[in-house]
Amino acid sequence: MPELNAGSTAWVLASAALVMLMTPGLAFFYGGMVRSRSVLNMLMMNFMCLAIVGVLWCLYGFSLAFGNDAFGGLIGNFQFVGLGGMGSADAPTLIGTAPDTIPIWAFAMFQLMFAVITPALISGALPDRVKFWGWSLFVALWVTIVYFPVAHWVFAFDGSTAETGGWIANQLGGWITTDGATLDFAGGTAVHINAGAAGLAIALVVGKRRGWPRDPGRPHSLPFVLLGAALLWFGWFGFNAGSALGANVNAAIAFSNTMLATSAAVIGWLIVEQVRDGKPTTLGAASGAVAGLVAITPACAFVNPIGALAVGLVAGLLCALAVSLKFKLGFDDSLDVVAVHLIGGLWGTLSLGFFATTSLNSSSADGLFYGGGFSQLLIQLIAAVSVLVYSFVVTLILATIVKATVGLRVSDEDESTGIDESQHAESGYDYSGLRIGGGSGSLFEHTTASDRVPATPREGSTP
């Protein structure tokens, strides 16, 4: 009988905590990019995903994602409802391959954090204009009908938490070649392509912001953006390396490749900005880092270091160029969920068809550049397109239902005056104590007469 590996269990639990931190990190990343009058709403849209998805994961989400397959690889059954049937403290059910056996409880909490951040990513397509409770209902419906089934497709391997798992993880590769397998180490399809396609669909249903694209809205706090990107980069080591489900060689490879690809992506994005705009920006550096993290996610344990650099560099170049798509095609994806997560996720998943190699990981495959032919690329393409189409179509339906019932969009007046006040009766910044002019408590209280220059609002900070 396998014994619990304490080191691997500790690593997976720590990784779960790192991935949990990514959602507040994402909130800062997105929050800094919106107007100051919308920052609280953006933070709340992300924070609420922790609450809603946490409850649903316990009630039925983990079971639908990782229970024994109930219908042709499409959805799990109800064997883990209420997180029951998972063993006790005295006799924990262990999963994983010896010696890296861990309690199923650790695995369940690790995967919960993936389920939380995926709908949070979608929120970047919707700043300034969405009702908070309409968004909350959408999240509950979306994770139930889109994320939990797709997680079953991609993450539920036969014999892991259940006897039979999902079709992408276990069946798709064999349809193309006798020994084929879909490669997605940490969620390029289930998380990033899924969220990116959903972001596009719901942005189309909700519609454009008032004044867009004439007034695209400037970031109100670039320090917030860079802080959020740094927290995401930090947490992503848990996201990718934790997906090894053990303190092992694959975890170390994934950790290393995550760092390398992200570094290269920052450079790639800034090159595009320098050539196109004449200046490299802080916003570009932060966005490039996230693009690299997205792209390396499915490939992190299946490519070598040079492959990781290539994946990251192309992601930075490609995603920076893809930002212009929303202006050319006319959809208001406010914070570039499509450009970064959909395009970056597609590239990361397809890159395995080129750069995957068995030289470091025998569970990998050899891509086109390593003598493997086109079969792996075809497998990756089918997986990516299947998730993209399912997510886009079902999200379009769910968003339309929410819009027609409780409503999704705030009124024009609320959008103009500020969504923080209308939805939360709060503002992110208190300006009530600031007065231009002399006297106690004024902006000039600690200046000399020669220093007294009339203050002007910082660019992008005015509500």
Image (cartoon, rainbow, N blue to C red):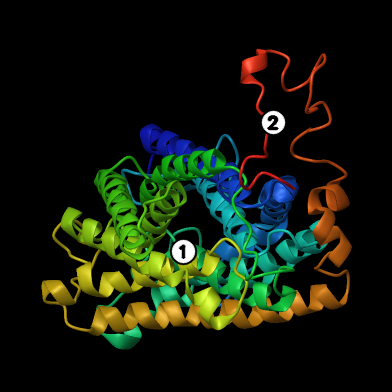
Q: Position of residue 310 (x, y in %)?
A: 22, 62
Task: Tell me the amino acid under the disc marked 2.
Answer: Pro
Label 1 or label 2, whichever lies nearer to me, is 2
Q: Is residue 407 left or right of 214 when viewed as pictured? A: right
How many neighbours does mark 1 have within 10 angstroms: few (below 14), some (14-19), or many (20 or more)? many
Please tell me in which quadrant of the rendered image residue 123 appears. bottom right
Instruction: Give above or below for 121 relative to 6.
Output: below
For the N terminus, the image quarter is: top left
Q: Which image quadrant is residue 411 in?
A: bottom right
Q: Is residue 60 left or right of residue 248?
A: right
Above or below, 455 relative to 156: above
Q: Name the residue at 66% across, 44% down.
A: 461
Q: Secondary structure at mark 1?
A: helix
Left/right of residue 396 with respect to residue 381 in the rendered view: right
Q: Which residue is mark 1?
A: 340
Depth check, front residue: 38 or 144: 38
Which residue is under mark 2? Answer: 454
Q: Nearer the viewer, residue 84 or 348?
A: 348
| Residue that lies at the very extreme toward the front in this rendered image | 450
Is residue 311 at all visible to an observer of this figure?
A: yes
The picture places residue 281, in percent across and down from the top left corner, at 42, 50
Q: CA distance from mark 1 to mark 2?
A: 40 Å
Question: Element under label 2?
Answer: loop
* Three-letter residue code for mark 1: Val
Q: Is residue 204 above or below residue 234?
A: below
Can residue 96 be seen here? The reply is no
Whichever of labels 1 and 2 marks the residue nearer the N terminus, that label is 1
Give whichever of 217, 302 is nearer the camera: 217
